[in-house]
Amino acid sequence: MTKEELLNQHPDPEAKEWFESRPPQVQAAILETPPDCYRSLDNPGHYRLYSYEEPVNSKEITVKLIHGRDSFLPGVLVFGVDRNSLLRCGCGKWQGPTKEQVRLTKKRLDAEKKRFKKEQA
Ligand SMILES: [Zn+2]
């Protein structure tokens, strides 16, 4: 995607200001992996790109994603995602989790945490 295409999709002045205030390597990552919905090469489901993580020690720029309603961890925000593990979907139909999904996901993760603690003890 070019900068012009990005700014046509997000015409608000804040988007332009935000984009132009990022370091050059982050701008390049934004154009390569623009704000959109994505699919994973590793798991089924649908993810929303949430943010770009700025490079530390010139490491590859990763992104944060939010799992959608049709994913295996609805509502969970994950960080450090390799941009090469994603396929741009672009359907514009990503849906956030339902309240019930958030409740069940939290319950499941709490149970896993407890089990992990027990195994470590
Ligand atoms: Zn999509």
Image (cartoon, rainbow, N blue to C red):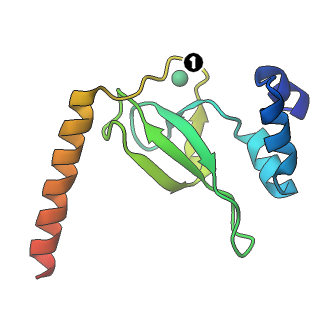
Q: Is mark 1 within 8 Å of ligand 1?
A: yes
Q: Is residue 54 left or right of residue 25?
A: left
Front one among 65 and 102: 102
The residue sitting at 58% across, 54% down in the picture is: 82
Q: Quadrant of residue 86?
A: top right
Residue sitting farthest toward the bottom: 121
Identify residue for label 1.
92
Q: Quadrant of residue 43?
A: top left
Tell me where residue 25 appears, x and y as whole percent.
82, 56
Q: Amino acid at mark 1?
A: Gly
Tell me where residue 6 appears, x and y as whole percent.
81, 29
Front one among 102 and 92: 102
Mark 1 crowd level (few <14, some 14–19, many ≥20, 10 Å Cα): few
Residue sitting farthest toward the front: 14
Q: Is residue 68 above or below residue 61?
A: above
Q: Is residue 62 above or below residue 6?
A: below
Q: Quadrant of residue 20?
A: top right
The residue sitting at 82% across, 42% down in the picture is: 19
The residue sitting at 18% across, 55% down in the picture is: 110
The residue sitting at 75% across, 71% down in the picture is: 58
On-image quarter of the N terminus: top right
Residue sitting farthest toward the right: 4
Front one among 87 and 20: 20
Front one among 113 and 119: 113
Q: Is residue 82 left or right of residue 69?
A: right
Tell me where residue 35 appears, x and y as whole percent.
66, 34
On-image quarter of the C terminus: bottom left
Provide the secondary structure element on which disc 1 rests.
Answer: loop
Q: Is residue 56 left or right of residue 99?
A: right
Count the labels in the image: 1
Q: Is residue 60 left or right of residue 119?
A: right
